[in-house]
Image: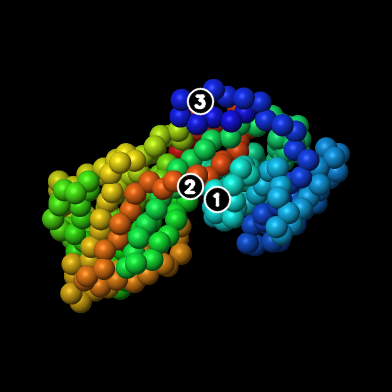
Amino acid sequence: MTYTTGSTPKSADAVRRAAVFLHGKRDLVATAYDRLREVARRSDVELVEGDEPPDLAVVLGGDGTMIRALRRYLGTEVPVLGVNFGRVGFLTSIMADDLENGLARAFAGDYAVADLPTLDARVDGASHVAVNDLVVHASTLGRMVELGWEVGGEDYGALACDGVVCSAPSGSTAYNLSNGGPVLAWGLEAMAITFIAPHSLRIRPLVIGRNAEAVIRNRTPDVRATVLVDGHAAAEIGPGPEVHVRLGEQRTRLAMLPDSVFFRRYRETFAS
């Protein structure tokens, strides 16, 4: 089944071709890959590689591998389903010991898909798309940075901090959550803005919608700031260049078993 905000779930078709993404530490998933291949054989599913378009992408890994697969199929109709072999694995929906049963169900079409918004960013003339989050932080370890920020055309001045996280719903349970930011349920068209170790008693995280843009500026003369897109360095800025961030037009397609949707995953991962 597929759902977006305000849509009605519908049944998914049985999977006939599946792509596979493996954890970076391949020894962790070597046996799991053999188990996956056996499930695929029994389900009459062809495992494909490269540019061959699959019906479903299967991840054997954690959230980092999930993000890599979601980026690979960004803007396509290919959903990404995860079996957790990572530390947290919030974006996955199948536990490692339930691999056979979970994948057999998914290959038979028994899965749901959430269409999730991304972030569009412009940094010093270059464009970037973030599936998870965009972070601006001090490039020098142990130094604070003074960041100017505005939202929706309103200037909020400057704040001394370690950095700021702008997160999409899929990334709100990662770096954003660990800094006290709000969790955005899948289905929301929103972005969370959360400062990292702000030197202030008044600053609070902010959630904005699709029509608003956030602008971040480095106002620290002697400390440069690094811009991370989904955990990877995209730019380094001093005073002058601006970072513009808003909800993007491209979407990712996150697949999950119907009994492992957002609120259950949230309870199992963070509330128990």
* Residue drawn at point x = 42 percent, y = 41 percent: 169
Q: Is residue 85 left or right of residue 6?
A: right
Q: Are marks 2 and 1 in contact (CB under 8 Å)?
A: yes
Residue placed most toward the observer, 124 or 45 = 124
Query: Label 3, on which residue?
Result: 7
Q: Are marks 2 and 3 in contact (CB under 8 Å)?
A: no
Q: Amino acid at mark 2?
A: Gln
Q: Amino acid at mark 1?
A: Leu
Q: Earlier in the sequence, mark 2 or mark 1?
A: 1
* Residue drawn at point x = 86 percent, y = 43 percent: 41
Say if 218 sits above or below 28 in the image.
below
Q: Is residue 233 left or right of residue 136?
A: right
* Residue drawn at point x = 42 percent, y = 60 percent: 128
- The quarter holding residue 16 reads top right
Q: CA distance from mark 3 to mark 1?
A: 21 Å
SS under mark 3: loop
SS under mark 1: loop
Q: Earlier in the sequence, mark 3 or mark 1?
A: 3
Say if 78 sits above or below 72 in the image.
above
Say if 148 sits above or below 262 in the image.
below
Q: Residues within 10 Å of mark 2 (few under 14, many from 20)?
A: some
Q: Residues within 10 Å of mark 3 (few under 14, many from 20)?
A: few
Q: Is residue 86 visible?
A: no
Q: CA distance from mark 2 to mark 1?
A: 7 Å
Q: CA distance from mark 2 to mark 3?
A: 18 Å
Query: Label 1, on which residue?
Result: 74
Query: Label 2, on which residue?
Result: 250
Q: Amino acid at mark 3?
A: Ser
